[in-house]
Image: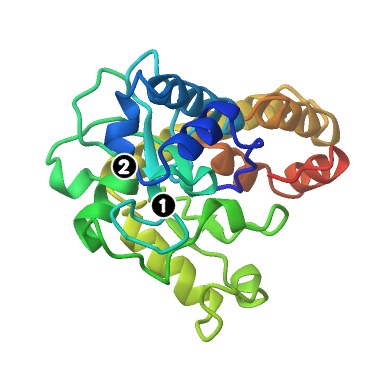
Amino acid sequence: MKRVIKSSEPTELKTYRQACPNSEWEVMRNDALHGGKAAYDMIVDMLEADQCGICAYCEIKISRKNNTTRVEHFVPKALRHTRINWGLHWYNLLGVCNGGSQNRSAPGHYLKPQKQNLSCDANKELALGTTFSHPLLLNPLSLPAMQPLMRLDHATGDWRVHEINAKSLRWSSAPHTSGVDLVESSIEILNLNCPRLSRARLTVLRSVEKEIKQARLSGLDPSVFMPNLVKRYLGPRFREFFSVYRFRLGDHAETYLQSIGFNG
């Protein structure tokens, strides 16, 4: 999971919310009369653009064209608030994958048994229900840019807590909870270590390992080929499983991201 930086709220959504402040998300999606459908289309396009076409939770590639993008409400849209309509709140919306809930030909998007391989908002809803907002869940909009909170297990492809980074952070959303507990809880609620995703991350990791090994066997200087790998894999647009590449490329990745003013 990497930090998500959102663009300013689309005018179409703001206009629709002003016209129909109490409307619900499902109603807006099909409301052509008040511009709801246009607002929905713009929301999806902007979420994909802001996130460089990767899921806000697991970082797998998403695409509206391939029907692998859907909109997640971080705070459940069914929750009622006197001042905030969570269903239409721009900063409550994230672009996510189908969470393994639909059979797709794209590798990594589906694996049997389905229930054990649900992830992201699909598993979040299964774990928490549709009307419960969990205090121990990382919000991609609030993640630190330069202190990864997870480290990859090379043998399994599972995400583990990066204890040094997690312990050093304090969270306004959960002030009495340790960063370690917050990260562990997020991994569990989103089921980020389901076999489907761990297998996909291992495939990426092994591909990078192979490329590094070949470069070394060719006698190339690591001080030259590693920075080149970093530039290819981490910029200018972020590719799926960005954090896997970042983890494996280590200090070279952090140096590059600092040099470009990486903020998410």
The circle on residue 212 is none
The reply to whether residue 55 is visible in this rendering is: no
Query: Image point 62% across, 30% down: which residue?
Result: 238
Query: Image point 65% across, 31% down: which residue?
Result: 212
Q: Nearer the viewer, residue 181 or 135?
A: 135
Looking at the image, is 227 positioned above or below residue 122?
above
**Residues packed near mark 2 inside 10 Å, few (<14), some (14 to 19) or many (20 plus):** some
Where does label 2 land, which residue?
A: 24
Circles 2 and 1 in contact, beta carbons < 8 Å: no
Query: Image point 36% across, 19% down: which residue?
Result: 33
Please provide percent x and percent y for residue 203: 42, 33
Instruction: Please give left or right for residue 63 compared with residue 262 in the image.
Output: left
**Residues packed near mark 1 inside 10 Å, few (<14), some (14 to 19) or many (20 plus):** many
Please provide percent x and percent y for residue 185: 39, 68
Kindly state the secondary structure of the residue where label 2 is placed.
Answer: loop
Residue lying at the far bottom of the rendered structure? 176
Kindly state the secondary structure of the residue where label 1 is placed.
Answer: helix
Where does label 1 land, which residue?
A: 86
- In three-dimensional space, the C-alpha distance between marks 2 and 1, rounded to whole angstroms, equals 9 Å
Q: Nearer the viewer, residue 247 or 63?
A: 63
Q: Which quadrant holds residue 69?
A: top left
- The amino acid pointed to by label 2 is Glu
Quadrant of image for the C terminus: top right
Q: Which quadrant holds residue 63?
A: top left
Looking at the image, is 46 positioned above or below residue 245?
above
Instruction: Please give left or right for residue 215 compared with residue 171 in the image.
Output: right
The reply to whether residue 160 is visible in this rendering is: yes
Instruction: Please give left or right for residue 118 compared with residue 31 in the image.
Output: left
- The amino acid pointed to by label 1 is Trp
Q: Which of pointers 2 and 1 lies earlier in the amino acid sequence?
A: 2
Q: How many marks?
A: 2
